[in-house]
Amino acid sequence: MALKFVDKFGAAALLSAIALFDTTTFGVSSSPVESAAKLRLSSATDIKWDNDVPFLADAGGKLHKSTLDPELQNHLQAFIAERGAPIASVVVIDVVTGEVLAMAQGRSPEKWGASSHTALYSRFPAASLFKTVVTTAALEMTPTGPDQPFGLPGGCGSQDITPTGTWMNDEGGGSMSLRRAFGKSCNGFFAKLAINQLGIGAITRYAKLFGWESQLPADVVVDTSKMMPPPVANSTTHTVGRFAAGFGHVGISPMHGAWMATLIANGGVPKPIKLLRQPGDESAQNGTPIYSPQTGKRLMDMMRSTIHGGTASQTFGRGRYRSIAHEVGGKTGTLTGRTPAGLTSLFIGLYPVSAPRIAVSSVVVLEDRYYFKAPQLAAEAIITWKQQKAKNTHARR
């Protein structure tokens, strides 16, 4: 089955028609689960230690006991600092409880223009992490299967998504499956998929279900991730294609990325983020699944392709990270950001992907020096968590 190209006038009609479905539920809840009252952390969000117990200060200076794991938190904080303390952050969440185990950052946010912890800053470009939204919409709303071949004569590079790019061609050889396109982060594939089978309405609908344009369910305030979809009335194949491939005006915070990964780990069920330890508080409940069980299984399985032969294979294919490669699933993103300025590297992932225990999200801004990329920071978080669990298990025997 080959994808058929639609010209810009036909595309506009298709996009307008599909956008009408934006008010329907597609059989899922219309918004993430609501959370209880939230606390706003102080702008510095300094971690205070009392007998190795981590506390966070709210905007009024009051300290609150956190869910952070001291050993994991300190290791990741040191890992970033020892490599030059770039603009960077990594978040680790226990997917069963929703508790934040680590929330480390590099350079102090006030030095590069942020007013909160780097993990809560939502103006990093989402880049190709947004392809996760498009993939989910395709699995839910079209006959597209993970391994179904589609004609793709054009290329995968961003330079091909132009008004006259080869990504719009139907003639010629070449094909690619959704699984391989996801792992390789093939821009042309997702641009064409959006134009011919999805449209703006479906994509923005699932983006909202994945947390954009709303407050995340959390016990602390997380900056809202904003997006600016192309206007339906005058959209073209070019503008919609770029939006779907991750080149639109779409922001994300590392905490949002970790929540996305937690959502996927729990089969599409939204789970509240818990950064503050409040024993016995069961007021925050899980939400309704945003997609079907079949889509959930397919999506988690497809995340393996990023690690094996995909955009994160170089990180997980060498050194000590090779020992965890077969158990990790994820998605990468790379795009030049403006605030802060620099090439932004992103990663969200699950471990172990067959039965996830933790979700991880990382962001690294590559400025005038090369420090490391987001997949390496995430891999360090995963392997440290694994080693820590093994050590604790051994100690209890």
Image (cartoon, rainbow, N blue to C red):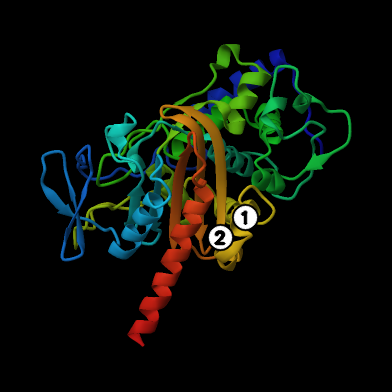
Residue 156 point in image, percent of width and height = 72, 35
CB atoms of marks 1 and 2 within 8 Å:
yes
Q: Quadrant of the C terminus?
A: bottom left
Classify mark 1: helix, strand or loop: helix
Please state if 172 lies on the left or on the right of 260 as rendered.
right
Specify few, some or many for label 1: CA neighbours under 10 Å numbering under 14, 14-19, or 20 or more.
Answer: many
- Is residue 371 found left or right of 35 in the rendered image? right
Residue 307 is labelled as 1
Q: Which residue appears at 19% of the width and 40% of the height? A: 42
Look at 64% across and 54% down and name the residue there. 313
- Badge 1 or badge 2: first in the primary sequence: 1
Residue at the location (71% across, 30% down)? 192
Q: For mark 2, what is the residue?
A: 328
Front residue of this view, candidates 75 and 4? 75
Q: Amino acid under label 2?
A: Val
**Residue 298 locus on image (x, y percent):** 62, 54
Distance between mark 1 and mark 2 Cα atoms: 7 Å
Quick check: can you spot residue 174?
Answer: yes
**Would you place residue 202 above or below residue 8 in this image?**
below
Is residue 263 at all visible to an observer of this figure?
no
- The amino acid at mark 1 is Ile
Percent position of residue 8, x then y? 70, 15
Which element is circle 2 on? loop
Crowd band around label 2 with a 10 angstrom C-alpha radius: few (<14), some (14–19), many (20+): many
Q: Quadrant of the N terminus?
A: top right
